[in-house]
Image (cartoon, coloured by chain):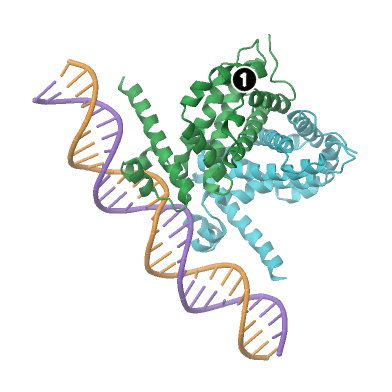
Chain colours: A cyan, B green, C orange, D purple
DNA sequence: TCGAGAGTCGTCACTTAATGCCAAGGTGGC
DNA sequence: GCCACCTTGGCATTAAGTGACGACTCTCGA
């Protein structure tokens, strides 16, 4: 079981590097942050940083990805007989503490990176990559829901549109938080669930959201 | 009026470089293509290439962007009293020759780059950037249509979802063309217009597509 | 318990993408 | 022709990213 163990270690190290890199990006800007500085902040050699990340900007990916991971896990558990609205309220509400255990600081950091992506084209890539991942996951989820292959053009359209509105909502909320909005207000589960479910239903022309048989 | 003149020249040079770069990317791969080779193919110095493009991959942007420019111009001319379906059929049909005058070779090249973006993460950025531009334009168009500010969260959702389905359709068609489909068949105006209009209407929950008063 | 094998990390040398700087040349207005 | 302005090329330089090798650690099997 070496592979399993090392995979966990690898993920943890990547997250560690990502945290420090994101912090530096936020405080002194992307261009002004060198690979050497990231390595030094984490306490590893520069070579190790490049071993785990293909580029400087991609160092932000794990942190950003973690921001959407919770939502994706919840969506993967979406049972056929339940509406999206109900499912999101239930799961996001029940798992609230689990979500918090993902570390509030990381969530804030992720929002900062998304914010930075507005002005730093280098970081925009990381954010768009994360959204791309979301879209891929949604491809599977929606394909399964509609009982169609993920390659199906309509499934792809729905997945793309859904991922897009999820992204917009994420950017919106992130901006609000960074502008000083109360975290608890933003994290208001039922409101967030409603808005998300409604956005996805609308973006798919009503094809995704209802219970199926 | 030096400035205006130089802007045209600048755009033409960028496109020229972009063409050569895209050709090289397609034939020998992105990693195997150096900035020096691009410069040599165009007939300018390496320094000039870096003066006009911030990175190697971004050299593909103008070609990719040109692929969506026609559609965006048409959408900007969309009058209130007409349905999207009708408008697209009319404009894309009438302007068919203009579209062709944008150089068929460029359109093919753009499709190749989009295809390459599937496997080359470096190029993916260029494609996503082009889609980002599309979304931004749609923000203005849809905001104007709905008589709401472009900042409005619902306008943003609709624009994002629309841009997403346009992207999916573009990828789909590009893949079909490169797989050997007939260009004329793909360029079948009414079919394309219908599919596009339907996709946008669906992605916006029916809020964008009808005539408005 | 010991050693083989696999995996990861650090150091050093190296390639190449990308920027700053300055001098040369071309263009338009006077 | 001369001056102001912009673009280009060449050179030096920084920083991103890779390859190669030796040292260290962990685990498995004898």
| Residue B3 horizontal/vertical position (percent) | 33, 23
**Res B158 quadrant in image:** top right
For the N terminus of chain A, the quadrant is bottom right
- Whether residue B55 is visible, yes or no, is no
Q: Is residue B42 above or below residue B29?
A: above
As drawn, is A132 to the left or to the right of D1? right
Identify which residue, B128 or A25, lies in the foreground: B128
Q: Residue at x 58, y 37 (%)?
A: B177
> Is residue B51 toward the left or the right of residue A179 in the image?
left
Chain designation of label 1: B
Residue A186 higher or lower than B45, as above or below: above
Residue at horizontal 62%, vertical 38%? B176
Read off the residue under disc 1.
Answer: B88
Q: Is B56 on the left-hand or right-hand side of A144?
A: left
Q: Is residue B110 above or below residue A17?
A: above
Which quadrant of the figure contains the C terminus of chain A?
A: top right
- Label 1: state its secondary structure: helix
Within-10-Å neighbours for mark 1: few <14, some 14–19, many 20+? many
Q: Residue at x 51, y 43 (%)?
A: A122
Front-lying residue, B99 or D11: B99
Q: Residue at x 63, y 46 (%)?
A: A64
A70 sits to left or right of B118: right
Q: Position of residue A118 (x, y in %)?
A: 55, 36
Q: Which x, y percent locates residue B96?
A: 53, 21
Q: Is residue A150 visible?
A: yes
User: What percent of the width, then of the height, locates residue A83?
Assistant: 86, 36
């Amino acid at each position: 079981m070496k592979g399993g163990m090392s995979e966990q270690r690898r993920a943890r190290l990547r997250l560690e590097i990502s945290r420090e890199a994101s912090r530096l990006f936020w405080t002194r800007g992307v261009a002004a942050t060198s690979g050497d500085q990231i390595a030094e902040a984490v306490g590893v050699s520069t070579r190790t940083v490049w071993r785990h990340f293909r580029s400087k900007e991609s160092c932000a990916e794990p942190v950003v990805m973690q921001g959407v991971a919770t939502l994706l896990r919840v969506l993967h558990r979406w049972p056929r007989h339940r509406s999206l609205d109900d499912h999101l309220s239930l799961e996001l509400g029940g798992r609230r503490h689990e979500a918090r255990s993902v570390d509030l600081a990381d969530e804030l950091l992720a929002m900062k990176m998304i914010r930075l992506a507005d002005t730093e084209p280098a970081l925009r890539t990381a954010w768009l990559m994360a959204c791309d991942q979301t879209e891929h996951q949604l491809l599977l989820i929606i394909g399964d829901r509609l009982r169609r292959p993920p390659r199906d053009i309509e499934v792809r359209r729905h997945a793309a549109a859904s991922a897009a509105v999820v992204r917009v909502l994420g950017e919106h909320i992130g901006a609000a938080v960074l502008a000083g909005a109360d975290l608890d207000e933003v994290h208001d589960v039922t409101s967030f669930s409603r808005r998300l479910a409604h956005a996805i239903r609308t973006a798919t022309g009503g094809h995704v959201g209802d219970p199926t048989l």
